Amino acid sequence: MFLDILKALVIGICASAPIGPIAILVIQKTLSKGHKAGFITGMGACVVDTLFSIVAIFALAAARKLLDDHRELILVAGGIVVTLLGWSMSTSNPFRKMKAGETSSSAAIVKDFLQALVMGLSNPGAILVIFALFAFFGIGPLDRPDWRVAPIIFSVSLGAAFYWFTVTWLLSRFRGKFKFRTVIWINRLTGAAVIIIGLTLLGEGLFRMIFMGGHFF
């Protein structure tokens, strides 16, 4: 069990590490708002990783069948959501959030968390990464619920939370070195990168539907 817990910690870190829409969002939030906002955004991704870990342990076969049966719908819907979030990122105004010592409002904190949560859930690549990591480390799936896997799931969350805390803390150390104009361009470029990812997902879904005989339902 101890070895599985260590493996789960590594899974949490590895699942968070790839540069994707979530990582880009966390970087943007950290540089424009600070460590707290960046970490809260990362915790939204942490919740997604936890949910996908539960699926990987208890319902891997069903989840794979769902992904295979509705791949086009998932890609198109996910692409639209990610593209819209990218557009929101690229058009946001970070000026009023760059004051030193600024404390984020509760509404802003919840918005950052939910934005990451929605982006993570809408990205089919995220759950595939979790599946691959669990398979690589030889954890799960189980035929029935077992409370003994709770430390494993918690360890995945802890690994992801540790990763996002470390990354956002390091980024926040450099935050003061950026000028306002630089932060605006960071917002625009990171937003554009997320838009490209979203359009890629959307394009793949439409391509499968039109040229590969795929269907929405």
Image (tube, grey):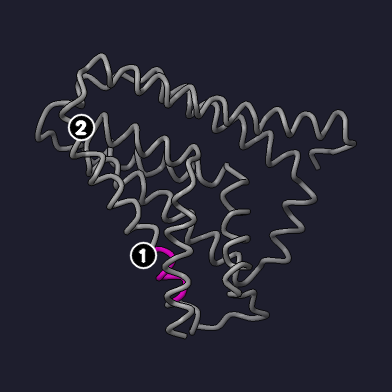
Decide whether the magenta segment is chiefly helix, strand or loop.
helix
Q: Residues within 10 Å of mark 2 (few under 14, many from 20)?
A: some
In this rendered view, identify the residue nearer to me: 143 or 107: 143
Q: Position of residue 49 (x, y in %)?
A: 48, 57
In this rendered view, identify the residue nearer to me: 169 or 29: 169
Q: Which residue corresponds to the image point at 18% horizontal and 39% vertical from the top-left?
A: 173
Classify residue 203 as left or right of residue 133. right
Q: Position of residue 211 (x, y in %)?
A: 87, 30
Amino acid type at circle 2 is Arg
Q: Residues within 10 Å of mark 1 (few under 14, many from 20)?
A: some
Q: Which residue corresponds to the image point at 76% horizontal and 46% vertical from the top-left?
A: 70
Secondary element under disc 2, as helix, strand or loop, is: helix
Q: Position of residue 78 (x, y in %)?
A: 61, 37
Q: Which residue corresponds to the image point at 49% horizontal and 83% vertical from the top-left?
A: 147
Classify residue 106 as left or right of residue 213. left
Q: Which residue corresponds to the image point at 64% horizontal and 29% vertical from the top-left?
A: 200
What residue does disc 1 label? 158
In this rendered view, identify the residue nearer to me: 145 or 159: 159
> Which range is magenta?
152-158
What residue does disc 2 label? 175
Residue 208 inside the magenta-drawn segment = no
Q: Earlier in the sequence, mark 2 or mark 1?
A: 1
Classify residue 110 as left or right of residue 80. left
